């Protein structure tokens, strides 16, 4: 087990070279409260039946119609923003090795790691990401991880 942990820690902590991020003027003003509409939009993007993260809360729980998670999440996320501190469990993940179906299954390098994260953190990140994309202009050279653009030409 130690061999696997050491292998995945090694490949997960490698820092790849990247160009410096250009400096821009800061955006000033109060942070607007996170709304139920933003949460509802983020929840609609979540796929059902996904594995739980370290907090063991399923995505289906947040999409449940038996209670109103939008209101609870809005209050919780606004508290996170006001306190400028995210929950400790958001910095944790569960690593699952997925076999690449090539060569020996006994060799660690024949697996790719999948990190399971907290679904509440993913909802929060979607909201923050949406707000950032509304104010940031992406370079025309940017093509990876951009909505509506593909790496396949």
Image: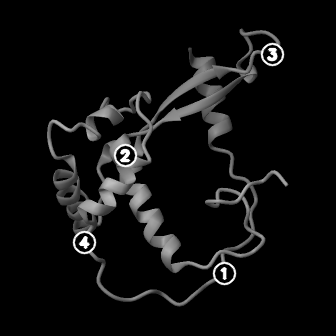
For image coordinates 65% across by 74% down, the residue present is 138
The disc at residue 102 is 3
Q: Nearer the viewer, residue 129 or 93?
A: 129
Q: Secondary structure at mark 1?
A: loop
Q: Are marks 3 and 4 in contact (CB under 8 Å)?
A: no
Location of the C terminus by quadrant is bottom right
Residue 8 at x, y = what percent? 62, 30
Q: Secondary structure at mark 2?
A: helix
Q: Earlier in the sequence, mark 2 or mark 3?
A: 2
The disc at residue 33 is 4
Q: Earlier in the sequence, mark 3 or mark 4?
A: 4
Q: Are marks 2 and 4 in contact (CB under 8 Å)?
A: no
Q: Earlier in the sequence, mark 2 or mark 1?
A: 1
Question: Disc 3 to disc 4, how far (Cα)?
Answer: 49 Å
Front of the two marks 1 and 4: 4
| Quarter where residue 61 is shown | top left
Q: Earlier in the sequence, mark 1 or mark 3?
A: 1
The disc at residue 121 is none
Question: Disc 1 to disc 4, how far (Cα)?
Answer: 28 Å
Residue 133 at x, y = what percent? 52, 71
The residue labelled by disc 1 is: 22
For image coordinates 20% across by 55% down, the residue present is 76
| Quarter where residue 125 is shown | bottom left
Q: Are marks 1 and 4 in contact (CB under 8 Å)?
A: no
Q: How many marks?
A: 4
Is 130 rendered above or below residue 93? below
Whether residue 153 sits left or right of residue 2 in the image: it is right
Front of the two marks 1 and 3: 3
The residue labelled by disc 2 is: 90
Question: Disc 2 to disc 4, how far (Cα)?
Answer: 20 Å
For image coordinates 62% across by 20% down, the residue present is 4
């Amino acid at each position: 087990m130690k061999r696997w942990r050491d292998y995945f820690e090694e490949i997960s902590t490698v820092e790849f070279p990247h160009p410096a991020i250009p400096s821009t003027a800061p955006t000033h003003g109060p942070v607007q409260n996170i709304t139920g509409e933003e949460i509802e939009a983020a929840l609609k993007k979540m796929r059902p039946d996904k594995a739980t993260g370290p907090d063991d809360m399923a995505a289906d729980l947040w999409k449940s119609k038996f209670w109103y998670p939008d209101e609870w999440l809005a209050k919780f996320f606004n508290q996170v923003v006001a306190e400028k501190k995210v929950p400790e469990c958001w910095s944790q993940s569960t690593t699952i090795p997925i076999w690449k179906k090539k060569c020996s299954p006994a060799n660690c390098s024949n697996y790719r790691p999948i990190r399971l994260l907290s679904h509440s953190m993913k909802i929060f990140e979607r909201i923050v990401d949406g707000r950032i994309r509304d104010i940031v202009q992406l370079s025309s050279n940017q093509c990876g991880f951009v909505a509506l653009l593909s790496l396949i030409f």
